[in-house]
Amino acid sequence: MSYVQMPEAENKSARTLTMIIYALYASTLLCLFFAPFIAIVLNYVKKDDMVGTMYESHFRWQIRTFWYSLLWSVIGGLLALIIIGWAVLFAVFIWFTYRIVKGWLRLYENKPMYMDAPVVTRMYGGDENF
């Protein structure tokens, strides 16, 4: 699968932003509970800028990681009263950690998260086709 080539400056900016969002999600593991909420806001604010690029798949991965982690954390928190919730919370922790590490490694390797993601053609400037 091929992706739209971004101009170098824009590519560097998109890569840096995607790295920052991974760092914000990862900081959750260090008990900075506000960080994923900053990250999800950044994901949604900048999501349209990533359409057609490799970073679109990373944003989709990050957004899904946030919402599923939040859902299962709430369920685990409610079930913690009857012990089984602690196992759910531990599983969420392991799953969340896996998703952040895998995403960050794929970004480091300059690879998209999903190999079968559709490619959207995007034009930069006047007649430039990338």
Image (cartoon, rainbow, N blue to C red):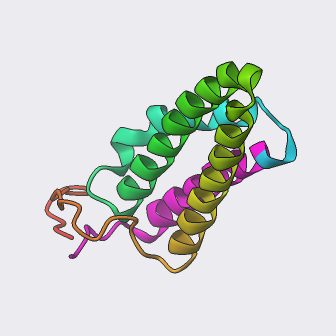
Magenta stretch: give its range: 1-28
Which of the 4 quarters of the picture holds residue 77?
top right
Most common secondary structure along the magenta stretch:
helix
Q: Residue at x 19, y 57 (%)?
A: 123
Relative to 73, residue 23 above or below: below
Residue 41 appears in the figure: no
The mark total stands at: 0
Reply yes or no: does residue 70 show up in magenta. Answer: no
Residue 23 x %, y %: 71, 53
Q: Residue at x 18, y 62 (%)?
A: 119
Q: Nearer the viewer, residue 83 or 38?
A: 83
Q: Residue at x 52, y 80 (%)?
A: 109
Q: Nearer the viewer, residue 31 or 88?
A: 88
Relative to 120, residue 116 above or below: below
Q: Residue at x 69, y 39 (%)?
A: 89
Task: Classify residue 4 as left or right of residue 90.
Answer: left
Residue 31 x %, y %: 86, 39
Which of the 4 quarters of the picture holds residue 116?
bottom left
Task: Classify residue 10 as left or right of residue 24.
Answer: left
Q: Nearer the viewer, residue 107 or 77?
A: 77
Q: Quadrant of the C terminus?
A: bottom left
Residue 63 x %, y %: 47, 41
Reply yes or no: does residue 11 show up in magenta. Answer: yes
Residue 15 x %, y %: 53, 62
Task: Classify residue 118 as left or right of residue 13.
Answer: left
